[in-house]
């Protein structure tokens, strides 16, 4: 036994073991790693010993350098496996190599090509070559591009259950391949299993249309049903997602579907200390411009306010932090230049997590783009809430994100493309800043009951209660 394993058993000898099956784990920079790490951290504080089965670090496209996976003195046991590459990965690798060979910029070209494919004309979409390509792509994404992880994860997870006396298994997805691993472990080991859904499987609005086909959609629905009926508990991250699955599966026992949201870790913010707002009126977006999300309406609104003399360009700043150089097939720098904002907008690539949180705290307004996401809430929405700043949520007026942000002091919801609405809000918030340089929000706002509800210490306790209930309950048979 290695020193690391000996330390693990010494620190956790009196705790019950829970296996967490997750594709994303630090140093993965994707948002999926956040829920997994917070879950492990706070379950360990509730008397559970988390063991993680995930993939090797070399498979992550974006990585953060982090000292700790979940901020605890003793790390959970993390077991990493291989995976098979999806044929699409090999295809994209070949294309990247060709563009690099000829001096092209892959990220920009990839973004343009994606936009072209997603906006194919009706005639092209009906051609037999287009239909054949769409059919093949849809199967390569069934249930997702990470299916090559399945056999390795199953073997490793079964071994972990037997070797460590695991009491319960949690699979968290997407990728939904993680739930197929959980299903296999449930069947092979006859163990309690929680399927944790961060996104809906069959009704995911963010999945491009060209990755759908009749066969692929039916396979995904069949797999989803297998997971939901066989899991002992199904955890959804929003009430809207819970209601969606209740409607699809009306015969499913109501106690089986549970809502446990994402949240923020108050300790992370406490460790940052007091961070005053910037001297300039600062608008920040932290994340990635993906799917149909674009800062175009925001930039247009700010540009018009400057030209109308309602904003002082020397007293304001806009920061896009993360993967924000391209949006909807366009260069964001070009969009900025078109609105005359080149000296005001700063595009900053991925930052270490503490730096990203500090950037939120220094801002006056935090922008949340959540269109095409009616059943989900972006994880950073909760961190925006903890930062205690104005939140401008651009999303559908009827959806999980809108429902949340409307409850938050200082939050506002506008539909996508409403640049006039953005102008009205920013004008009012800028006036508050001009009066007192604070943006008008009370610093005690982050301690309101609405915000406290989403602290991970509270969420962890609720999850532990579900875990214990699941472990002790008799399996639900059908």
Image: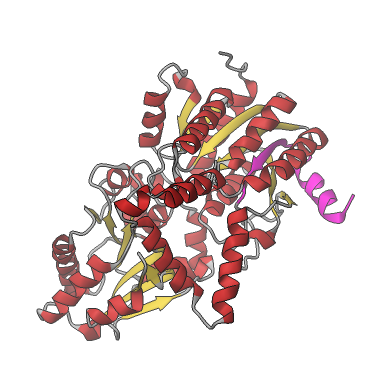
**Left or right: 291 with respect to 140?**
left
Q: Is residue 342 magenta?
A: no
Q: Position of residue 351 (x, y in %)?
A: 51, 71
Q: Position of residue 331 (x, y in %)?
A: 36, 75
Determine the residue positioned at 34% across, 44% down.
Answer: 449
Q: Position of residue 121 (x, y in %)?
A: 31, 55
Rendered image quadrant of residue 277: bottom left
Rendered image quadrant of residue 280: bottom left
Q: Position of residue 209 (x, y in %)?
A: 39, 48
Determine the residue positioned at 58% across, 56% down.
Answer: 88
Q: Is residue 383 visible?
A: yes
Residue 78 to residue 196: above or below: below
Determine the residue positioned at 74% across, 44% down.
Answer: 152
In the image, 3 versus 346, the foreground residue is: 346
In the orientation shown, which residue stands out farthest toward the front? 128
Residue 70 to residue 62: above or below: above
**Left or right: 367 with respect to 432?**
right
* Stretch of the chain drawn in magenta: 1-23
**Left or right: 136 with respect to 383?**
right
Determine the residue positioned at 78% across, 32% down.
Answer: 165
Q: Is residue 260 visible?
A: no
């Amino acid at each position: 036994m290695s020193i690391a394993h000996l330390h693990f058993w010494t620190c956790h000898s009196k705790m019950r073991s829970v296996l967490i099956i997750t594709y994303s784990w630090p140093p993965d920079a994707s948002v999926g790693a956040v829920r997994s790490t917070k879950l492990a951290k706070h379950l360990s504080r509730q008397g559970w010993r988390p063991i993680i089965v995930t993939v090797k670090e070399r498979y992550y496209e974006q990585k953060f350098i982090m000292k700790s996976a979940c901020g605890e003195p003793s790390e959970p046991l993390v077991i990493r496996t291989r995976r098979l590459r999806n044929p699409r990965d090999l295809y994209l690798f070949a294309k990247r190599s060709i563009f690099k060979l000829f001096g092209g910029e892959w990220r920009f070209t990839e973004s343009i090509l994606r936009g072209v494919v997603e906006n194919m004309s009706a005639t092209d979409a009906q051609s037999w070559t287009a239909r054949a390509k769409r059919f093949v792509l849809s199967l390569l994404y069934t249930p997702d591009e990470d299916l090559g992880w399945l056999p390795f994860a199953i073997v490793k997870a079964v071994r972990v259950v037997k070797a460590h006396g695991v009491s319960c298994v949690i699979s968290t997805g997407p990728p939904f391949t993680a739930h197929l691993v959980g299903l296999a472990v449930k069947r092979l080991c006859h163990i309690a299993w929680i399927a944790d859904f961060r996104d809906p499987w069959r009704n995911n609005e963010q999945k491009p249309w060209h990755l759908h086909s009749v066969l692929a959609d039916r396979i995904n629905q069949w797999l989803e049903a297998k997971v939901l009926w066989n899991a002992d508990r199904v955890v959804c991250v929003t009430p809207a997602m819970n209601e969606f699955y209740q409607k699809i599966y009306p015969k499913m026992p109501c106690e089986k579907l549970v809502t446990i949201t994402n949240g923020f870790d108050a300790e992370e913010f406490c460790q940052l200390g007091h961070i005053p707002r910037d001297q300039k009126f600062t608008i920040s977006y932290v994340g990635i411009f993906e799917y149909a999300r674009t800062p175009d309406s925001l930039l247009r609104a700010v540009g018009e306010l400057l030209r109308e003399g309602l904003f002082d360009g020397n007293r304001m700043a806009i920061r896009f932090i993360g993967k924000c150089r391209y949006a909807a097939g366009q260069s964001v720098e070009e969009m900025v230049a078109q609105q005359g904002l080149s000296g005001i907008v700063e595009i900053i690539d991925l930052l270490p997590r503490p730096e990203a949180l500090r950037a939120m705290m220094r801002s006056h307004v935090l922008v949340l783009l959540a269109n095409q996401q009616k059943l989900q809430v972006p994880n950073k929405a909760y961190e925006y809430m903890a930062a205690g700043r104005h939140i401008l949520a651009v999303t559908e007026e009827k959806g999980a994100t809108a429902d949340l942000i409307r409850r938050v002091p200082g939050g506002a919801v506008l539909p996508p493309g409403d640049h006039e609405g953005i102008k009205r809000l920013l004008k009012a918030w800028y006036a508050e800043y001009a009066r007192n340089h604070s943006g008008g929000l009370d610093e005690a706002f982050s301690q309101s009951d609405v915000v406290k509800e989403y602290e991970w210490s509270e969420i962890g306790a609720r999850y532990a209660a579900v875990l214990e209930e699941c472990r002790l309950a008799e399996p639900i048979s059908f």
